[in-house]
Amino acid sequence: MTDDDTNRHRAGRTGLIVKIPEAEPAVRGWRERLDPGAQEGVPAHVTVLFPFLPAGRIDGAVRRALAEALAARPAFTVRFERCHRFPGVLYLAPEPDGPFRELTEAVAERWPEAPPFGGRFDEVVPHLTVAQGHAEAALADAEAALVDSMPVTARVSSVALLVHDGTRWRERASFALGQAP
């Protein structure tokens, strides 16, 4: 979850992510040093929707609606074969990225009051952040080292709801995707 908004650390903020544990061996060390999200407890992931609703609004009805919306999307397999950049950010690009876009669209359509990244971007680009907010040399070092760790293949079968407690991000719930035909 990339967000340079000063409210990122506010208790009660939420986000929906797809955890990518298969990428942890390759990216953990880099993320721990170069990604503030990792330092706050966020695992290697691709963001589905951030910020989502305030934690106080996530009741049983919202959880049921999330479960229903996400179960309608099939589970899928993804590969991370190369690094890409945004200004000041190094990330792994998922291939295909369409299923991640569809997850984001499904949730954002259901909760239009929670647009992806607060509506700051015209296009949401699915990505697994490795480093952000560091000098170009640090990003280049991480990118050069990651080349030998790829490709990473992952099976995506759920979406996690994370909630910030004022200090760290914690998983509050997990929602299963449907089974691929």
Image: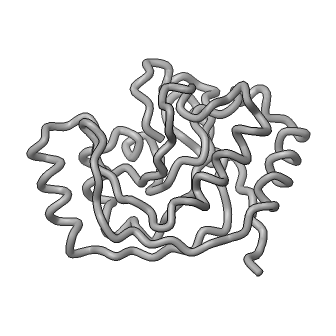
Name the quadrant of the C terminus: bottom right
Left or right position of 116 against 8: right
The image position of residue 19, as x and y in percent, is 54, 59
The image position of residue 74, as x and y in percent, is 73, 68
Q: Depth check: 165 or 8 in front? A: 8
Give the answer, above or below, for where 126 lies relative to 136.
below
The image position of residue 112, as x and y in percent, is 73, 30
Q: How is the image coloured?
A: one colour
Q: Depth check: 181 or 152 in front? A: 181
The residue at 85%/35% (across/down) is 59
User: Which residue is farthest bottom?
Assistant: 181
The image position of residue 38, as x and y in percent, is 39, 46
The residue at 64%/27% (across/down) is 12
Q: Depth check: 6 or 79 in front? A: 79
Image quadrant of residue 51?
top right
Image quadrant of residue 76?
bottom right
Count of marks, rendered view: 0
User: Which residue is farthest front?
Assistant: 122
Give the answer, above or below, for where 60 lies relative to 91.
above
User: Which residue is farthest top?
Assistant: 6
The residue at 79%/27% (across/down) is 57
Left or right position of 47 against 93: right
The residue at 43%/52% (across/down) is 127
Left or right position of 155 against 135: right
